[in-house]
Image: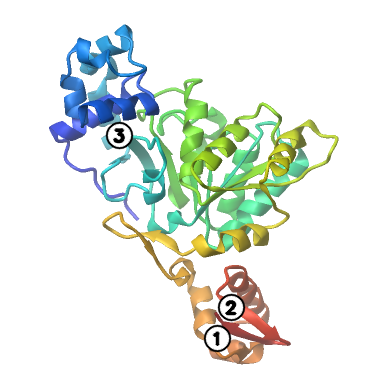
Amino acid sequence: MAAPENEPLTDDRRASLLLTLLPGVGPLARQRLLQRFGDAPAVLAADRGDLLTVQGVGPKLAEKLVAAEEHVGLDAQLEAANAAGVRMLLEADTGYPALLREIPDPPGVLFVRGNLESIDQLAVGIVGTRHGSRYGLDQAERFAAGLARAGITVVSGMARGIDTAAHRGALEAGGRTVAVLASGVLRPYPPENADLAERIARQGAVLSEAGPTMPPISGMFPQRNRIISGLSLGVVVIEAAERSGALITARHAGEQNRQLFALPGPVDSRLSRGPHRLLRDGAILVRSIEDVIEDLGPLMTQAERNDGATIRTPRELSLNEIEQQVLRAIEPTGSLVDEITAATGLPVQRVLSTIHVLEMRSLVRRLGGNRVARI
């Protein structure tokens, strides 16, 4: 499916992009400036003295704001985005993720390769160390694959280690995944994940609040973590040392009222210290995706309407064709597996595996023996 075209670049949109991309204007500074002056055009039209009255704005940043066009190189970024089919989503645009609007400091713009879809509102973040053990990498792939097969989008940061394993697990399971970068979407980091970024863009989305050709900047790594958690209903932490960036994502999850999950590991491993500390502090212990789905069950019907409003939508919208076929064959009062097999014409093993997925998603329940019913 082709990405939607970008909206025309009005003066207001240009001002919003300049304010968001101006070096030195972080998410909190942007929010303070907008609160003080009302909108982006007013911020950029303000004089130096008025700008200096805003908390966090010093003389250097005030000078940059007065001459924003000189410091951003916006036209070159827009040309690169349009040439590569990169979509720009401003906070007020249709298609901007509804969950992300809820956080205290949403990005002013998202540059998107691939497509964000309504079903991506059913998302879980998976994060962890860049130096994952075999255990951690295997678990990241297992959790991501299981979530993807259940119709849940996997969100991560495409860093080395756990993030990469999570994206690959979702892709191999045929599901959707979203990568949030600290660099521009046309300059993916780490460079060895360039091919992975291409796969993600075909099967989900690669996005960033940085200009499309921008290189990675150290301060952008912790900053982008709020987007990973902000896009997700919950975040799973798999292996993290005590000073891991994954714990920054966990902190953001707590501040954003997202559910926080942690996978336990060997007690003598330093990579277990982060998840074990989170568990001690109240995170939910997970052993399988069933633990995640069970806890998030009441939220799993959330989606986004075409006008950007968050609504409650039946979970059937995220089912694939076979899952829908099996679900339709199950009566609310109950059906035998043999009856479902006969009605669908599918092999019995395929029916059983599909029923297991539907059960994990709280769409059907077992009545005993070989009988299941719709919920």
Q: Is residue 14 visible?
A: yes
93 or 133: which is nearer to us?
A: 93
Counting other residues with Cα less than 10 Å from the Cα at mark 1, is it few (<14), some (14-19), or many (20 or more)?
many
Q: Secondary structure at mark 2?
A: strand
Which residue bears the numbered disc 2?
364
Which residue bears the numbered disc 1?
330
Q: Which image quarter: residue 280?
A: top right
Q: Name the residue type under label 1.
A: Ile
Q: Which mark is residue 105?
A: none
Q: Secondary structure at mark 1?
A: loop
Q: From mark 3 to mark 1, how far is it between C-alphas? A: 47 Å
Counting other residues with Cα less than 10 Å from the Cα at mark 2, is it few (<14), some (14-19), or many (20 or more)?
many
Which residue bears the numbered disc 3?
81
Which of the image's four quarters has the C terminus?
Answer: bottom right
Residue 84, percent from left and from top: 32, 37
Q: Is residue 51 left or right of residue 175?
A: left
Q: Residue at x 43, y 59 (%)?
A: 119
Sequence-first disc among 2 and 3: 3
**Furthest residue to the right?**
268
Q: Name the residue type under label 2.
A: Val
Q: Nearer the viewer, mark 2 or mark 1?
A: 2
Q: Which image quarter: residue 25?
A: top left
Q: Is residue 278 left or right of residue 198?
A: right
Q: Nearer the viewer, mark 2 or mark 3?
A: 2
Q: Is residue 67 visible?
A: no
Q: Is 17 rendered above or below residue 173?
A: above
Which of the image's four quarters has the N terminus?
Answer: bottom left
CB within 8 Å, label 2 to label 1: yes
Q: Name the residue type under label 3.
A: Ala
